[in-house]
Image (spheres, grey):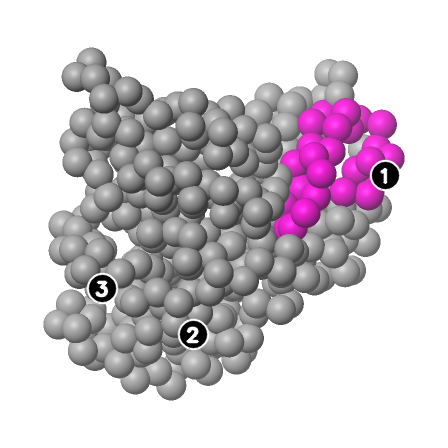
Amino acid sequence: MIDIRSDTVTRPTPGMLDAILSAQIGDDVFGDDPTVIALEKKAASMFGMEAGLFCPSGTMTNQIAINVHTRPGDEVICEAGSHVYKYEGGGIAFNSGASVRLIEGDRGRIRAEQIASNINPDDIHHPVSKLVVIENTSNRGGGSCYDPAELTKISRFCREHTLNLHLDGARFFNAMVATGVDPIETGKLFDTVSICLSKGLGAPVGSVLLGSRDFIHRSRRVRKLFGGAMRQSGFLAAAGIYALDHHIPRLADDHLRAAKIGNLLQVCPFVDNVFPIQTNIVIFTLSGKMTSGVFLDKLKEKGILAIGFGPQTIRMVTHLDVTDPMIEELAEVLKKI
């Protein structure tokens, strides 16, 4: 089976499995798991931040950040297709009682000027604009990357207007490899950062929330409240450390394979449009009477799994378990549809 539904379907490499089996462990709820501590320090150091918090998922790190940054009745500003709004189960409302202001961006990316025009006035009729969330890369934007200069403008604006700024960096390392953006410089721009270990980096589970010592101290309490405090999680943290040490440069291979898929799709008569491809996500729309369901069924019959992003929109994602021979097989299948 060729599984290109998501980069979350990866399996641990042999080296990662060795790291898991040899991990030193403790009890992270008691704060004495040495491998979790090492992962949190390593991730924080990469971004020049004071502390980190290991969590089961990127949804949890994002939701913890929103909860600590806001009070009930505050407003979160984000792009309309943002993961925090669209794919986290209504967590902003449920977990934090916050309102959301949605901005229509350019393939998932918003600009400082758009944020400026969406801040509420100091008026009792409106929620307090409190937090801006940026997603880099943007999932629904087809893996699109922010221009580092635009991120600097957004950061400067947020600080001038006392807005907290959070980075949903689920695929930040893809953006880093594609654009050369530096993690340390990125850390200077944001109040908090969430990085995911279980997507392109290939770890089985886990994300890390980064911020100041005080913010992470408060976040640790919220993680407990959300049920995210784990015991011998050093086994999982070991996979994360291995991923950060070994799997970042190889993301470039995923990007090249995604570009190859894009080239294949460009010449297919049933494809109407392919989003520009910057990283490892390929989004395209189907033409005529070809629906997502029909197309996905045709792929599945040939042992290929992709995912629908709408009635006539498909997403394919490359990752460390996708090989060149798999791309060649996909090419043959597409020719016969």
Amino acid type, mark 3: Arg
Pointer 1 or 3: first along the chain: 3
Residues at circles 3 and 2 in contact by the CB criterion of under 8 Å: no
- Residue situated in front as seen by the camera: 243 or 337: 243
Which residue is under mark 2?
Answer: 241
Label of residue 335 in the image: 1
Q: Start and end of the magenta stretch?
A: 262-286
Which residue is under mark 3?
Answer: 213
Q: Position of residue 328 (x, y in %)?
A: 81, 53
Occupied quadrant, residue 286:
top right
Name the residue located 17 percent from the left edge and 17 percent from the top edge.
124
Q: Position of residue 152 (x, y in %)?
A: 50, 47
Name the residue located 41 percent from the left edge and 48 percent from the top edge.
167
Element under disc 1: helix
**Quick check: 228 above or below 19?**
above
- Residue situated in front as seen by the camera: 170 or 202: 170
Q: Quadrant of the C terminus?
A: top right
Q: Position of residue 1 (x, y in %)?
A: 64, 53
